[in-house]
Image (spheres, rainbow, N blue to C red):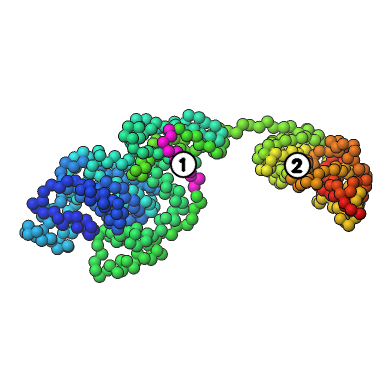
């Protein structure tokens, strides 16, 4: 049995058999009530001319009421589903001819008034099932008690309802233009330009309208309410509402008033979230973005990913009422990245590669003869780079490379190798790469793990400095160079000169100190020292050590800044 809620009964008490037709809405009273948001809180009465927001628990129906006092009254009802399809039905039943016993003017007992409505079935006017924003509009509606029944069978959800008896004058929702589609006027790899026709509410009625664009990769949205529900993330807002704020007892086990003997039980039941609130696990946030662009009619969306499909929705929002209308959404796929030219590597030949900041280069190595092993030697001149090697589509290697690194992979007959080199985020990258199927073909010299140059402060004089560096078990040629620099020479300037691929041939002859061969079978003793003489007192010098391999390719150690003593 369906019982009426108290605020509704209070509205009906003044009615009597001799009542005269009243204006559909007392505007002064209505405006006062709308300003007082608490007036419609905890109520299942729909106000005339104001949008209400509420919620539904899954498979738990909900009913709202409103009264139309006069016959032949215009009526408009709008129901906006947010994040789940709704089933809703609008019906009406006649108002009672008398609301008082014997026409005495005395109100009937409460229980008798409830029975007058709930014993009668209303006449169904309209029903709908789906997730579209749907309307019921009538230019001439009968007086009566109107009932709006809503149900969500999919999940807990929010929704909005707007009802008015003055639809012509209210016009709360922005009107769509004759062509409500969004046009894609320009398409790039990371940008999409959209254009749309203005809402007549702005162009003709001069009401304040702003346009909000929604971008995502999943689907189009039919209402801004649905967007906001998605942005709220992971359904955490569908926990049990707080008593006294977001629900009335009308919303739960049955519609109507709890009797005096179970009111306490009802409230106690609702306070237990474990009994009633649906605890949902957290889900990752959807890749969804909303941007409001004022009253513009064209906008370029940027920072998109290449070769990716995006969905675009446009909403006209009346900033006076905060109500919105959806344009017809569209979708578009951004253009593919320009295909980069693949560089062919020749067996045993060094190739120089330059990569833009955050860029990438692709190289291909297709050995002519069968091979058991393939060796990739990489010399990163500046900061670290990432190398990936695939053999016939299968990933074999993915590592960051700083300095000189050598990778030996198992070979395969007629195999083809694709090498992807990815640059650094800080700046451009330079490197040298060698691919070979001949294991003895080593053009780059081997390096110790530590390529720093150590200076001995106690051995420093006014005209000399003593330094040391590590070597390897492989016999290599080492050349040391010096360059006088200003006293304000700093680490930032030194970093700019740290291109390890620049060899001794780029240095002035006057900067050369000496060259010598050095190695040690005992890796623990593979260290050499050198005293650099003929320096000026109190001056700063930048020292560089180059190791030169058998193929003539050199690698520079980390530069060292030293300073001679001023007084000796």
Question: Quick one: label 1 or label 2, which is nearer the N terminus?
Answer: 1
Q: Nearer the viewer, mark 1 or mark 2?
A: 2
Residue 241 position by quadrant:
bottom left
The answer to whether residue 73 is above or below residue 261 is above
Left or right of 53, for residue 480: right
- Can residue 507 be found in the magenta stretch? no
Q: Are marks 1 and 2 in contact (CB under 8 Å)?
A: no
Tell me the tag on residue 496: 2
Q: Which residues are magenta?
A: 286-297
- Residue 245's disc is none
Query: Can residue 62 be seen at all in this image of the molecule?
Result: no
Q: Nearer the viewer, residue 474 or 67?
A: 67
The residue that appears at 34% across and 51% down in the rendered structure is: 53
Side (left or right) of 402 relative to 510: left
Residue 403 spot, x, y in % from top left? 78, 45
Left or right: residue 98 versus residue 332 is left
- Residue 233, placed above or below residue 316: below
Q: Residue at x 48, y 55 (%)?
A: 282
Confirm whether the magenta stretch covers residue 289: yes
Return the x and y of residue 57 as percentages of the image width and height: 36, 55
The image shows residue 72 at horizontal and vertical percentages of 16, 41
Quarter the C terminus occupies: bottom right
Disc 1 marks which residue? 291
- Could you tell me residue 23's position as x and y percent? 17, 46
Q: Which residue is pictured at 36% across the width and 65% down the height? A: 271
**Closest to the observer, 207 or 42:** 207
Distance from the alpha carbon under mark 1 to that under mark 2: 41 Å
Identity of the residue drawn at 81% across and 34% down: 349
Q: Secondary structure at mark 1?
A: strand
- Return the residue nearer the eye: 363 or 372: 363
């Amino acid at each position: 049995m369906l019982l009426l809620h108290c605020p509704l009964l209070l509205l009906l008490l003044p009615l009597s058999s001799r009542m005269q037709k009243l204006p559909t809405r007392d505007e002064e009273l209505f405006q006062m009530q709308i300003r007082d948001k608490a007036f419609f809180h905890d109520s299942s009465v729909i106000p005339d001319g104001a949008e209400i927001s509420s919620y539904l628990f899954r498979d738990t129906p909900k009913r709202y009421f409103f009264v139309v006092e006069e016959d032949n009254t215009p009526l408009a009802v709008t129901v906006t589903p947010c994040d789940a399809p709704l089933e809703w039905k609008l019906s009406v039943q006649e108002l009672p001819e008398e609301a008082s016993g014997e026409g005495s003017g005395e109100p009937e007992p409460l229980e008798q008034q409830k029975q007058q409505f709930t014993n009668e079935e209303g006449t169904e006017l309209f029903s709908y099932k789906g997730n579209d924003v749907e309307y019921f509009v009538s230019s001439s509606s009968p007086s009566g008690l109107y009932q709006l029944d809503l149900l969500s069978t999919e999940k807990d959800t929010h929704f909005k309802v707007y009802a008015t008896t003055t639809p012509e004058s209210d016009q709360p929702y922005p009107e769509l233009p004759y062509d409500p589609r969004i046009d894609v006027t320009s398409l790039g790899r990371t940008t999409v330009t959209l254009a749309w026709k203005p809402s007549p509410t702005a162009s003709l009625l001069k009401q304040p309208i702003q346009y909000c664009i929604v971008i995502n990769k999943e689907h189009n949205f039919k209402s801004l309410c649905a967007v906001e529900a998605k942005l709220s993330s992971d359904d955490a807002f569908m926990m049990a509402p707080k008593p006294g704020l977001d629900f009335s007892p009308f919303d739960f086990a049955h519609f109507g008033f709890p009797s005096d003997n179970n009111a306490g039980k009802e409230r106690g039941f609702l306070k237990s979230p474990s009994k009633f609130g649906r605890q949902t696990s957290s889900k990752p946030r959807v890749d969804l973005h909303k941007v409001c662009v004022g009253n513009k009619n064209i906008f370029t969306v940027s920072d998109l990913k290449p070769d990716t499909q995006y969905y675009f929705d446009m909403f006209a929002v009346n900033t006076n009422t905060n109500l919105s209308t959806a344009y017809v959404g569209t979708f578009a796929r951004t253009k593919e990245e320009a295909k980069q030219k693949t560089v062919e590597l020749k067996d045993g030949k060094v190739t120089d590669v330059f990569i833009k900041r955050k860029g990438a280069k692709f190289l291909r190595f297709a050995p002519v003869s069968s091979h058991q092993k393939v060796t990739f030697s990489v010399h990163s001149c500046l900061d670290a780079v990432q190398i990936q090697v695939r053999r016939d589509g299968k990933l074999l290697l993915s590592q960051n490379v700083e300095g000189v690194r050598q990778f030996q992979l198992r070979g395969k007959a007629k195999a083809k190798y694709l090498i992807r080199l990815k640059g650094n985020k800080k700046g451009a990258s330079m490197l040298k790469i060698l691919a070979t199927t001949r294991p003895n073909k080593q053009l780059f010299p081997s390096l110790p793990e530590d390529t720093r140059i150590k200076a001995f402060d106690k051995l420093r004089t006014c005209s000399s400095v003593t330094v040391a560096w590590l070597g390897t078990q492989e016999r290599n040629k080492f050349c040391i160079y010096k360059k006088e620099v200003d006293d304000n020479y700093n680490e930032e300037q030194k970093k700019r000169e740290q291109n390890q691929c620049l060899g001794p041939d780029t240095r002035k002859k006057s900067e050369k100190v000496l060259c010598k061969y050095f190695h040690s079978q005992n890796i623990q003793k593979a260290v050499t020292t050198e005293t650099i003489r003929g320096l000026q007192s109190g001056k700063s010098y930048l020292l560089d050590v180059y190791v030169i391999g058998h193929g003539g390719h050199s690698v520079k150690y980390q530069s060292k800044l030293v300073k001679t003593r001023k007084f000796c």
